Amino acid sequence: MSDLQSLSPSIESDLSTFVDRQVSLTDILQGYQPLNSEDDTPFFLQTVFKYLPADGQFNLIEDLSRCQNDQELRQHAESLDTGLLRPMLSTGGKTPAITPSPCLELEESIDHLNT
């Protein structure tokens, strides 16, 4: 068994970190002024944030924190929509078929040779 000191330090789940991120998102979006009645940027960003894993939430907060104005927030939201989400949906919502591993075919060939 390996020495405990050689193990990586454990990462503790910290609810306060999650709350801080959520508060940060709220703070970032609080002063947002919609461009028009169809501008759903804050709702879109909150929805994206909700479904991201913790690391993704952290990265989104960092990215949004760098936005200097509402236009940059809109551009970032548009980038997420057109550069990430729409390409994921372009397959019609279907999960691609699993491609068999070439290693399995090799293993079957070896088994066939051994018989």
Image (cartoon, rainbow, N blue to C red):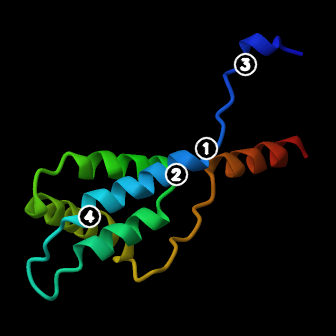
Compared with 37, 47 (above or below) is above
- Whole-percent x, y for residue 34 in the image: 14, 76
Q: What residue sits 66% from the left and 37% below the top?
A: 12
Please name the residue that numbered disc 2 is placed on.
18
Please name the residue that numbered disc 3 is placed on.
7
Report how far apart the C-alphas of labels 2 and 1 lie in the structure: 7 Å
Nearer to us in this view, 97 or 105: 97
Q: What residue sits 19% from the left and 68% below the top?
A: 78
Please name the residue that numbered disc 4 is placed on.
29
Compared with 6, 20 (above or below) is below
Question: Which of the 4 image quarters holds residue 106?
Answer: top right
Which mark sits nearer the N-terminus, 2 or 4?
2
Q: Residues within 10 Å of mark 1 (few under 14, many from 20)?
A: few
Which mark sits nearer the N-terminus, 3 or 1?
3
**Amino acid at pointer 2:** Phe
Which mark sits nearer the N-terminus, 3 or 4?
3
- Label 2–label 1 contact, CB within 8 A: yes
Q: What residue sits 16% from the left and 51% below the top?
A: 67
